[in-house]
Image (cartoon, coloured by chain):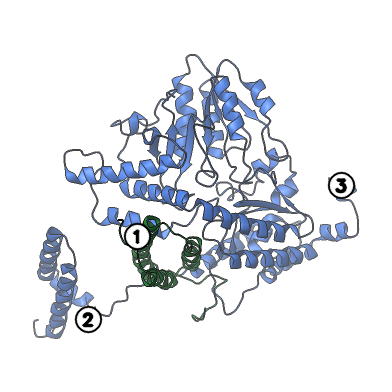
Amino acid sequence: MIRGTRGRLVGLFRSSALLRNNSRIYNNYNRRRDVLVLKSLDHVRCYSAAVSAVKKLVDDVSLEIHTDIQAAAKEQSEVRNNAASTSNKESKTESEAAILSSSNALKHAYQENTGFGTRPIYLDMQATTPTDPRVLDTMMKFFTGLYGNPHSNTHAYGWETNKEIEKARKHVADLINADPKEIIFTSGATESNNTVVKGVARFYKKTKNHIITTRTEHKCVLEAARSMMNEGFEITFLSVDENGLIDLEDLKKNIRPTTCLVSVMAVNNEIGVLQPIKEIGEICRKNKVFFHTDAAQAYGKIPMDVNKMNIDLLSISSHKIYGPKGIGALYVRRRPRVRLEPLLSGGGQERGLRSGTLAPPLVAGFGEAARLMKQEYESDHKHITELSDRLTKGLLSVEHATLNGSPSHRYPGCVNVSFAYVEGESLLMALRDIALSSGSACTSASLEPSYVLHALGKDDALAHSSIRFGIGRFTTNEEVDYVIKAIVERVKYLRELSPLWEMVQEGIDLDSIQWSGH
Amino acid sequence: MGAVGPTRIEVLHLYKQLIKNSRLFNDYNFREFFLRRSRESFKANKHLNDSQAIIDCYNRGLEDLSVLKRQSIISQLYTFDKLVVEPLKGSR
């Protein structure tokens, strides 16, 4: 046996020597010894298996890992085509030829640029943002050495992580002028919103049973409010005007003695509209009602001050500010104190409001992201405003394109535009080289038009043809120019196919047409 | 007497190093961002006179440089397809 495998055995010895060398690189004494022991054990026990596995010497292994998204994109388009063909079979009324021509049309609308890469431009910063390399740099050491539980206070491993957590907490608090003690880490803005809407309402349910929110809130606030309805609460959903702003008089009228909470989001995730937070805060403070704002899209991007704006509770998400996903925070005012019932019961971490061990890598990454948002505020704001102006100007130069939401009260990084007489989804399909969305990521799976645009009084057709562009720190001028060019070209192309567009060009008022078959 | 600030050559060397390491990023967006920020911040602090402020800025620059050195390596380890705005075959 030995004779037959002798050559390979020598090879194995060499490669294990290589591993031994590499394992010496570890600073950690224990780990180094463990690795060495493991390797030598391996070598005895799994001898025959290892020999067959090691085909050649392993010293020319490439360290690079390449992720090819072409395959994923191809798969996705196949799924889409299959879905389209099955739905086509169901609707026999449409002629097959028309369907074929329309899918061909989409293929024509999308033109590949030879000599360039294939990965789409990322313009969906409202869904999530890329993790800043500087944030990753802070997180790395928590995956390599700082693994202590921040809540263990009997040894140095716990202390060092706890110190980092408190540092992060300070960075997160500084950005909204809060005290670090008022920040509670959660798993994200959805958890923060749920904690507030359910927690505050449940705590005060003996005396109060009314919550006020708006129609354009994020789904998690709306759904949390709806579930409180089942617990006997009354919910008022405030309407918004065509600009997406709430009416302050309307808010004042709706506050009752039994109102315990007003929840209004700062920046809307779909249309980027900025609500008059300061004024709402004043009204709430005057009426002694707690004011919660969902600042997932606003935190770090527009100036916010919980004291000047009289905010009692504020939800924050880390992955919207170039931080890691899976972490967020909730600001809970201490003076005057806001009481709430925690969603989770447990060890009483985070002032007892959110039990469960914190995730130090995520918290530290979040803290660093917040620090960078503060440090880079001027530069980011200037850059994003510049790109946003350029994009808005370019897109609105298309005929019958309208900007959704208030043009003045807005966060410039979110541009929502409707292209009349073009189907939003087909435009998105023709724009495979740009990562965009027609609205919130939560609802993009379903084909129902955005409820936010509905609340603004837009009709179904316009809501269907809307596209949201998100600009961030890492977006470049070049990308924006590419996007403008692509959109202008493809809107024109898709409109040329549309009979509705032909009628509009001929000057026929579409509303005056009596459609047959109804 | 305060600490002696970095010399002109040291500052220029730091700038060159920052640019060089920014260029090493495989990711288009990160590369462009760090190039833009490096240029912007050096331009913005061009007329800095206060020696303590210069020392602070210089030290921050050194820290940034070490982050860039580490992260540009990571960016080269985990690579992705080129973006549609990036010309293929290296020529920038």
Q: Please report, as a chain letter, where disc 2 is located.
A: A
Q: Please report, as a chain letter, where disc 3 is located.
A: A
Visible residue check, residue A98: no
Q: Which residue is mark 1?
A: B59
Q: Which residue is mark 3?
A: A511
Q: Nearer the viewer, residue A168 or A20?
A: A168
What is the secondary structure assignment of the residue under circle 1? Answer: helix
What is the secondary structure assignment of the residue under circle 2? Answer: loop
As displayed, is residue B69 above or below residue A265? below
Neighbour tally class for label 2: few under 14, some 14-19, many 20 plus, Cα within 10 Å: some
Quarter of the image where the C terminus of chain A is located: top right
Instruction: Give the residue type that dot 2 points to.
Output: Leu
Residue A72 in picture, x, y percent from top left? 50, 65
Q: Earlier in the sequence, mark 3 or mark 2?
A: 2
Q: Nearer the viewer, residue A281 or A139?
A: A281
Instruction: Give the residue type that dot 3 points to.
Output: Asp
Q: Which residue is mark 2?
A: A57
Q: CA distance from mark 1 to mark 2?
A: 44 Å
Neighbour tally class for label 1: few under 14, some 14-19, many 20 plus, Cα within 10 Å: few
Q: Is residue A171 left or right of residue A444?
A: left
Letter of the chain in green: B
